[in-house]
Image: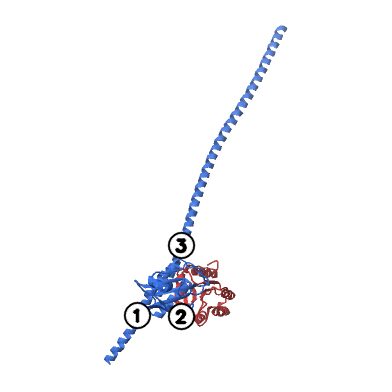
């Protein structure tokens, strides 16, 4: 069964780079959301194994989206990766408090994104894989 | 008779004595033989042991040599592994760089809308290079200067125009050569004429504009190899994308004008 990842990012370049980075992972289905609100609708209506979320987005920022995701019992423990230009300690602290699993600051490298997401998916799947 | 008996006894006594001597001599000889036998055995035994020790010593020497050979091979394989690891990391980095370059190139040519092209250039500079403050300036044929068309990190109207040759920005447009400043101080105030990086946007030999980068994101300490590659890519591909978008925009406008004119004639 394929794993499903939700990528919530307003930049088409970033969405493509994230998708391109993950091409090495087999049986992975990537669903894209173009802003926070779009991301919220998708995560409420579909099941995902992991979410990659930007912070600075129109309509709803990433931290607010994560807060809402964590309040939903269905997605309370879903692994969340933040990819953001925000590298400040305060933002990272807020993300940590929301139970974010990984925080990647821009500029990003395809290999780093791949390694982080692969690690979280393997952890979620457990030792038996 | 008595005398003969005495003579016989004497003779018997002599024989007895002689026999005893013979027996003693025999015992002595037997002892000597035994001693010789045991010495011989010892000697033989010592000789064998010495051969065994020799064999063992040779085997130990050979094993030592084998061990050294194995250690040498192990070190060789270890060095090879280190080389492979180094090569793997280089390839991985190159792969990452190529992924970034591929996406940047793909995105740049994904639209013919000038506004979208400028937005994509902005995204590439922020997300893939990690710049915080930068400006895209286009050459204005009428005014013969470089005018800001897109700014990030500063308001667009705060950015001045530059004449060809003015400051680093005008100098890059004139010389058509990319400029990289050696030192970077993230706390230094912005001097629009003297950016950290300035790249000319070239169509063949013509400069159609420049990109000037002033500050990097907080977490970005310095430029790395892929950044220079991305700047090179932008110098050529961003220029082509902007130029194509402008031409397309002009052609769409002209087509609309001609169509309107023809409609006017035919109706």
Tell which subunit mark 2 falls on.
B
Colour used to depict chain B in the structure image: blue
Locate residue A17: give its quadrant: bottom left
Question: Where, quadrant-wise, is the N terminus of chain B in this rendering?
Answer: top right
Locate residue B144: give its quadrant: bottom left
Tell which subunit mark 1 falls on.
B
Q: Name the residue under label 2.
A: B156
Is disc 1 surrounded by few (<14), some (14 to 19) or many (20+) residues within 10 Å? some
Which residue: 53% across, 38% down? B55
Q: Mark 3 points at which residue?
A: B90
Marks 3, 2 in one chain: yes
Between circles 1 and 2, the one closer to the viewer is 2
**What's the distance in space between the residues labelled 3 and 2, CA to CA?**
40 Å
**What's the distance in space between the residues labelled 1 and 3, CA to CA?**
41 Å
- The dot on residue B101 is none
Colour used to depict chain A in the structure image: red
**What's the distance in space between the residues labelled 1 and 2, CA to CA?**
25 Å
Spot the residue most to the front: B166
Left or right for B228, reference B35 = left
> From what the image shows, is residue B80 above or below residue B113?
above
- The dot on residue B248 is 1
Disc 1 is placed on an element classified as helix
Q: Earlier along the polypeptide chain: callout 1 or callout 2? A: 2
Q: Earlier along the polypeptide chain: callout 1 or callout 3? A: 3
Which residue: 58% across, 30% down? B43
Visible residue check, residue A121 = yes
């Amino acid at each position: 069964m394929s794993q499903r990842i939700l990528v919530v990012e307003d930049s088409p370049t970033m969405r493509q780079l994230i998708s391109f980075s993950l091409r090495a992972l087999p049986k992975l289905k990537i669903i894209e959301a173009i802003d926070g609100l779009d991301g919220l609708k998708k995560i409420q209506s579909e099941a995902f194994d992991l979410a990659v979320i930007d912070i600075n987005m129109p309509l709803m920022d990433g931290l607010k989206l994560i807060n809402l995701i964590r309040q939903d019992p269905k997605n309370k423990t879903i692994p969340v990766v933040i990819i953001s230009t925000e590298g400040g300690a305060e933002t990272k602290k807020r993300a940590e408090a929301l139970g974010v699993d990984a925080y990647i600051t821009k500029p990003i490298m395809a290999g780093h994104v791949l390694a982080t997401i692969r690690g979280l998916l393997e952890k979620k799947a457990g030792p038996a894989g | 008779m008595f005398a003969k008996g005495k003579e016989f006894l004497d003779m018997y006594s002599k024989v007895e004595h002689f026999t005893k001597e013979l027996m003693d001599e025999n015992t002595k000889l037997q002892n000597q033989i035994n001693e010789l036998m045991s010495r011989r055995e010892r000697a033989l035994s010592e000789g064998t042991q010495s051969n065994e020790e020799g064999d063992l010593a040779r085997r130990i020497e050979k094993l030592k040599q084998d061990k050294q050979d194995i250690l040498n091979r192990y070190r060789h394989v270890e060095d090879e592994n280190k080389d492979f690891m180094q090569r793997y990391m280089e390839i991985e980095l190159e792969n990452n760089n190529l992924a970034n370059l591929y996406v940047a190139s793909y995105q740049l040519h994904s639209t013919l809308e000038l506004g979208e092209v400028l937005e994509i250039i902005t995204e590439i500079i922020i997300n893939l290079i990690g710049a915080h403050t930068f400006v895209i300036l286009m050459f204005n044929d009428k005014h013969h200067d470089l005018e800001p068309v897109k700014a990030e990190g500063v308001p667009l109207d705060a950015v001045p125009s530059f004449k060809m040759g003015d400051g680093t920005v005008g100098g890059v447009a004139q010389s058509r050569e990319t400029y990289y400043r050696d030192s970077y101080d993230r706390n230094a105030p912005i001097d629009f004429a003297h950016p950290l990086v300035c790249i000319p946007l070239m169509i063949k030999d013509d400069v159609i504009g420049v990109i000037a980068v002033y500050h990097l994101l907080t977490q970005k300490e310095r430029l790395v190899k892929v950044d220079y590659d991305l700047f090179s890519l932008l110098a050529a591909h961003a220029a082509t994308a902007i130029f194509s978008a402008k031409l397309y925009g002009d052609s769409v406008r002209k087509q609309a004008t001609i169509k309107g004119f023809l409609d006017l004639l035919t109706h």
